[in-house]
Image (tube, rainbow, N blue to C red):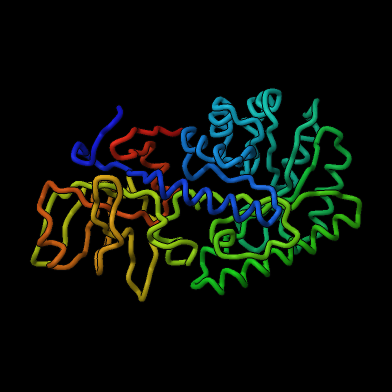
Amino acid sequence: MNGLSIQDICEPTLLLDETKCKNNINRVVSKVKNMGIQFRPHFKTHQSKEIGRWFQEFGVEKIAVSSLKMAKYFAQAGWKDILIAFPLNLRELPETLLLTKHINLKVTVSDIATIEFLSNILTFPIDVYLEIDVGYGRSGLPIDNFNLIAKALSLIKKTKFINLIGILSHNGKVYFCNSKDEVIEQNRIFLGKLFDLKNKLTSEGFDLILSVGDTPSVSICDDFYGVDELRPGNFVFYDVQQAYLGSCDFEDIAVCLAAPIVAIYPERNEMICYGGAVHLSKDYIEIDGVKFFGLLVDIFNDSWSFPLENSFVRFITQEHSVIKTTPQVLSRYKVGDLIGILPIHSCLTADAMKKYLVPNKSWFAHL
């Protein structure tokens, strides 16, 4: 379906601003290139082969994904160097090993049990990153337990078919920062710990690359000394959370949910929109004790406005968004109109919506 306009929208639709998106890609690609670091953007945010081609226009050749399904999708789209930056799922191991025969596939191991299993079953080499947890508490070997890391490395060294090429980590703590300065300081602490580990491993004969990546740090920070590879993903679209962190300006947010207005309640300065948790997710940010599930914008023919003052998604259910706004905004809208909602977390919104509309151009389906 090509050439669909804003006026044709009847249900929640995720709009994509191509210019903003390409500007975001260009900005981060250029920054990483100027730092002399390998760039492996994470494609879990957009999950689209068409948007993947935009990255290729800027010289990107290596990518990260978050699942085997995603790796297969992008391999079919022509990508040859793919890292699954998620702990290896042993139930998918046969399919994973099959894919390694067709592309340069790299996998992530995050615990001792997975390494032990691989050491007993592999019959040909696979490239592996060892995940390190720097206090985030998600997955990976704890950075402060060197004995456990040493055990993992010893097991890998004894297994001729595990080709360990790097250590990998994600600085999830930056998403809880409240300012650019906090992001910079958190990134400094995070990288310092990993660089110390890398140096220690180098002294013991391991020549490993250091791979990290998160959008706030890559967008805000300039010092990535010791890092060999960066893997941010959300920057392709950005979102409200990133804008409040200081990773981007609101004008950089490249996706917006177009939502039909289904009810208006002037007595409480609220409107109800068709576009709820199944479209936006239930992610929120909290500022001065108030939870925001999205910000309201006016929609134009090919883009949208800056966030409207005192207008936000107050709460959200499966299909409903309850929008708190002002009498002035309410006076400009009627039931049946479309409004725009900037998502709190664009990765989850994009995953929920499954496709994008570039107004007056085309639909882009994704994985």
Pick the front one: 333 or 65: 333
Q: Quadrant of residue 278?
A: top left
Quarter of the N terminus within the rendering: top left
Pick the front one: 318 or 129: 129
Q: Is residue 18 left or right of residue 89?
A: left
| Numbered circles on residues, count | 0
**On screen, 299 above or below 128?**
below
Q: Quadrant of residue 57?
A: top right
Q: Position of residue 342 (x, y in %)?
A: 33, 55
Pick the front one: 102 or 126: 102
Q: Position of residue 175 (x, y in %)?
A: 52, 63
Q: Is residue 246 left or right of residue 331?
A: right
Pick the front one: 28 or 238: 28
Residue at image point 58% right, 40% down = 65
Q: Position of residue 19 (x, y in %)?
A: 41, 46
Q: Is residue 119 left or right of residue 63?
A: right
**On screen, 31 above or below 349?**
below
Residue at image point 73% right, 67% down = 192
Residue at image point 48% right, 45% down = 45
Q: Quadrant of residue 164?
A: top right
Q: Position of residue 301 (x, y in %)?
A: 24, 45
Residue at image point 36% right, 39% down = 356
Q: Is residue 297 left or right of residue 198?
A: left
